[in-house]
Image (spheres, rainbow, N blue to C red):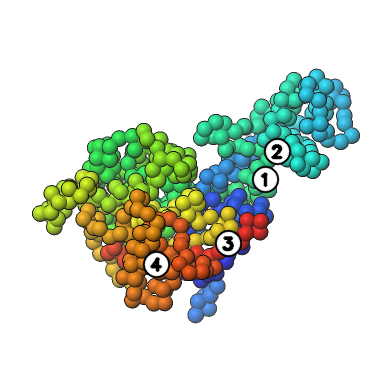
Amino acid sequence: MNRSLHNLLSTVHYNPAKDTLFLTGDILAKSTEAGSLAILDFLTEHRASTSCGQNDAHKPLPCKPIHAVRGNHDQMIVQWRAWRDWFEKLQLTFPSPHLYPRRPSAPSVLASTTTTASYDAGPPVGTGSQFLALIETEWLQDRSSDPNGAGSDAEEWVDTARKRAAGTWRAEWWKRIPQPGKGRTSKDYVMFSDHYWIARDMERKHAEFLYSLPLVIHIPTEHIFLVHGGLVPSDPRHPSNDERQPLAHPPSPDDEDDQSLKEHTGDYDYPLIPAQSLQHAFPRLASFNLDDEIEELRVVQERALLHDVPQNRDPWAILNMRGVRKGGKITRRSDKGTPWAKIWNNQMKRCVGFENVTVPAEHREDEDEWREKGNADPLPCYPSTVVYGHAASRDLDVRRWTVGIDTGCLYGRRLTALVLTRPQHGHHSPTPTSPTDDDAEDEDEDDEDESSEEEEDEQLFDEEYAHDAPLGDVNARYARVRGGSVVSRARRPKTWTRKIRFGDREEGLGAKLVSIKCPKVADLS
């Protein structure tokens, strides 16, 4: 993964003096341990750098920051490291060591008899770090002596070691070592997993970097959320037009303290990057005028999405979300429930602004026809965009108001970047989504067959990129407008680029996807 990351940065001509890099999480445990630690080295060294070359006047150029959100795999490493920071310093006192027979070498746990009465626990150790070193050595020896047997199954080994330690001094240490739970926590604290070893071997500066990662980055000037798993636009346990939903009622400046609004910070249950650290990436943030009533209300409403929707305050949901099941339960399974991105887009397409609490004026004469088409009631809101990772099983998933860029590099597929550029012109007033917009790029026709989708996509590309050769030719051959896998209509290239529509139309943000081929699974580093 480390090599693929640098290949992608080279492909997009990443310049740390000019470009700000954002990562959508799961930067670790996606390759070898050495590869993960190399990525941490790159990120921490870049964060600490104060100069990225010189300008034409030979004066030092400051480095633009790197920002990242925490992923679910990153979180597993954070949990193990935080626990180790506590456990390694722990000291326990046991009876005199002479009461415990010494052994010439560490025993094989799995070779021991099944009864604890004959189990030789060996001489006690006094600190947590000593106990971890002991059991790590024992497990590695068992795995080496029986690589295809029970010694290769870390979970079975740990379970056996716990049971055989009963009644010995080891039990006092084992009961302080966490175990995987059930349901949501079934993947947490798997001992001797990749997450465990990375947490053990990374440096203090690496740990501090991971501890600092927020779960959500909100960029109010661009109306963008960056998250690993996902967000929901409303509490799925209630109707979307329920007055308790943030998008179901016009926001008021009184909903939040004016000072906290101007600072773009909030009292969240998880860290949120302050706006001042994003000004290099989005210069308009420095002069963002909250006296603009619409902009102020949009910020209030977007912050309400994080504050007032319970699922968006749940760290597990933010890190693991892939869909929403009946009854409003968040699921991490990609084959269950409705994809959260579909729910987000369906509600964002109903946004008609804060003044048009019914059908927009320019469409009111067609209101009956509009409702006959099955459109849901409009919502008093402006749309916002979510960029996320996590859903590699769905591959590239590009919709009007969500962009999923996890294209499965871990599985030998691709690594993809979303590149945003701002044109050199001023900011314009936003326009709410038109509920009668039939743009096929905005729709998600899940019931259509694959062949008709590809035919429509080819037509859309012909129209949208006809003026943009040769880039349009590349896109027409290798990409799709709708969410889903990247399709090659000729020979799948090692690198492809594709333009997409992104964010407010009036903002004119240039957006393109750049994707490179990753090495085979066995060759990840």
Q: Are marks 2 and 4 in contact (CB under 8 Å)?
A: no
158 relative position to 240: left or right: right
Q: Mark 4 is on which residue type? A: Lys
Residue sitting at 40 percent across and 37 percent down?
325
Q: Is 249 situated above or below 120?
A: below
Q: Is 154 situated above or below 229?
A: above
In which image quadrant can residue 192 be found? top right
Of marks 1 and 2, which one's residue comes earlier in the chain? 2
Disc 4 is placed on an element classified as strand
Image coords of residue 149 (percent x, y):
76, 38
Numbered label attached to residue 490: none
Residue ID for mark 4: 499
Residue sitting at 65 percent across and 29 percent down?
176
Of marks 3 and 2, which one's residue comes earlier in the chain? 2
Residue ID for mark 1: 197
Of marks 1 and 4, which one's residue comes earlier in the chain? 1
Cα distance in 3D space between marks 1 and 2: 15 Å
Residue sitting at 29 percent across and 47 percent down?
347
Of marks 2 and 4, which one's residue comes earlier in the chain? 2
Q: Nearer the viewer, residue 357 or 275?
A: 357
Cα distance in 3D space between marks 3 and 1: 24 Å
Q: Are marks 1 and 4 in contact (CB under 8 Å)?
A: no
Q: Residues within 10 Å of mark 1 (few under 14, many from 20)?
A: some
Residue ID for mark 3: 518
Instruction: Name the front one of labels 1 and 4.
Output: 4
